[in-house]
Image (tube, rainbow, N blue to C red):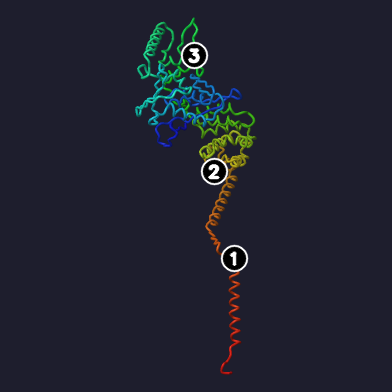
Amino acid sequence: MASVNVNRNLTDQFYRYKMPKLLAKVEGKGNGIKTVIVNMVDIAKALNRPPMYPTKYFGCVLGAQVNCDVKNERYIVNGSHDATRLQDLLDGFIKKYVLCASCDNPETTLLVNQKKGTISASCKACGHLSTISSQDKLTTYILKCPPDQQHNAPGASVSKRKKKERDDTKYRKDGQNGRSGSPQHDSDEATTTLNETNGGEQKIDPDNDWCDPTDVAEDLDNSALKKLTLNEDLEKSVHQRMQIFYDFVKEKIPTNGPIDVSIQKEIVAEAERLDVKDKGVIVLCEVLFRDPIKIQEKIKTNRHLFLRFTMDNPKCQKYLIRGFELTVKEFPNELLPRVAMILKTFYDFDILDEKVLIDWADKKKSAVKELGTQIFEKAQKFIDWLKIAEEEDDDDDDDDDEEDEVQVVYDERIRPDKIIELEDSKKQTEELKKSSETRDKDLDIDIDAI
């Protein structure tokens, strides 16, 4: 999974504090459209903050409602929002609630004092203690739902510790009576706005409309006890991840017609999430090329989807050729005679580069051993055409280089009309000189004869 610096203002590639690049997936249509932040749990773990905080920050800045489904690890912002836009907004959250105000180090801990209504950030690197401004709406939420704090941590009140002790005692009694229960977290007092029992009814703060308080408490417990890890799917084998991607693509791609841009982005995001973007084109071939007669039509219709995978990615293009070979294996009678035409279609739409195609043909390594020889024979004419075209391009480039070596220097001081005038004047001068000499000879007088 791609990672970026926590402080993206620093471009140092060896910067030690990294976080996953934000992945967003748009779901639904019309009024029900929403954006799911796929890897919010991973981002929150890298920032050492509960995942509800950045999610709620997005809602405050965008003016949208958010939904935190902690059990299923789904964090949703209503409306359609681009991942790049959300990543930029996340930088604002990090600058205000994660980075140290003194050294810009992300090793900070939030200290919430509910009694005074203040939030402080303590830096473990330089020891600086700064107070966070309480102007925006998120600070109100943090005061109600503080992060995990120990009983004796700075900012934890005496009444809070007593509340925790009473909850622990109640939990032990429940266990002895055979009832299942879990100890309430020390931050649950803030999470569940001081529930008071009035005639068997629970009194809930009407201002707490951002997330379900129970979900917040469960999330804080899970982050402390389970220490949330990275995406669990990445721990599975490549075959299992490819199967997950296949099921996802099969569900998203419509039977007929072009694929929406939003769905294309979802497919690419899912491939990146599962770390199978290079091999994902094999799945696209398997899903899109179900009708061997319409393969060229499918290539033209879904050109942009293929380009999202193969653009400037030779490795992915090689996997695309492999996916095409597997399709030929499935429909040999229909596709073997059309191998060259289909490869040319890939080439014409810039999905496959000529260098990748020529390299594939020269090495003659096929994913289908029994049909590999026939596939190469059928594609040979197209490959020869590519090589000739490449040689002609090289010759044209050489000619252009030779032409570039010839330099012509023009001097504005020299003009052809002036040169002609000078030559004419020179001829006239010589003629005048000769005529004058002849005239002098004729006028030569012998003085002795007189």
Gap between marks 3 and 1 measured at Cα: 96 Å
Q: Residues within 10 Å of mark 3 (few under 14, many from 20)?
A: few
Q: Residue 235 appears in which quarter of the rendering?
A: top left
Instruction: Name the spot of residue 36 as percent of width and height, x first.
Output: 53, 25
Placement of 58 over or under 358, stated as above or below: above
Residue type, numbered disc 3? Asp
Q: Residues within 10 Å of mark 2 (few under 14, many from 20)?
A: some
Instruction: Name the spot of residue 55 as percent of width and height, x first.
Output: 49, 24
Would you name the residue on which mark 1 appears?
416
Looking at the image, is mark 3 or mark 1 earlier in the sequence?
Answer: 3
Looking at the image, is mark 2 or mark 1 earlier in the sequence?
Answer: 2
Residue type, numbered disc 2? Ala
Numbered label tally: 3
Residue 115 placement, left or right of 75: left
Instruction: Name the spot of residue 381 as percent of width and height, x first.
Output: 60, 46
Indicate the secondary structure of the residue bearing disc 2.
helix
Placement of 281 over or under 434, stated as above or below: above
Indicate the secondary structure of the residue bearing disc 1.
helix
Placement of 439 over or under 377, stated as above or below: below
Figure quadrant of the C terminus:
bottom right
Would you name the residue on which mark 3 appears?
205
Viewer-side residue, 445 vs 414: 445
Indicate the secondary structure of the residue bearing disc 3.
loop
Which residue is at the far bottom? 449
Q: Which label is found at residue 175?
A: none
Q: Residue 368 appears in which quarter of the rendering?
A: top right
Residue 383 placement, left or right of 17: right
Residue 405 placement, left or right of 161: right
Residue type, numbered disc 1? Pro
Gap between marks 2 and 1 measured at Cα: 59 Å
Q: Which label is found at residue 361?
A: 2
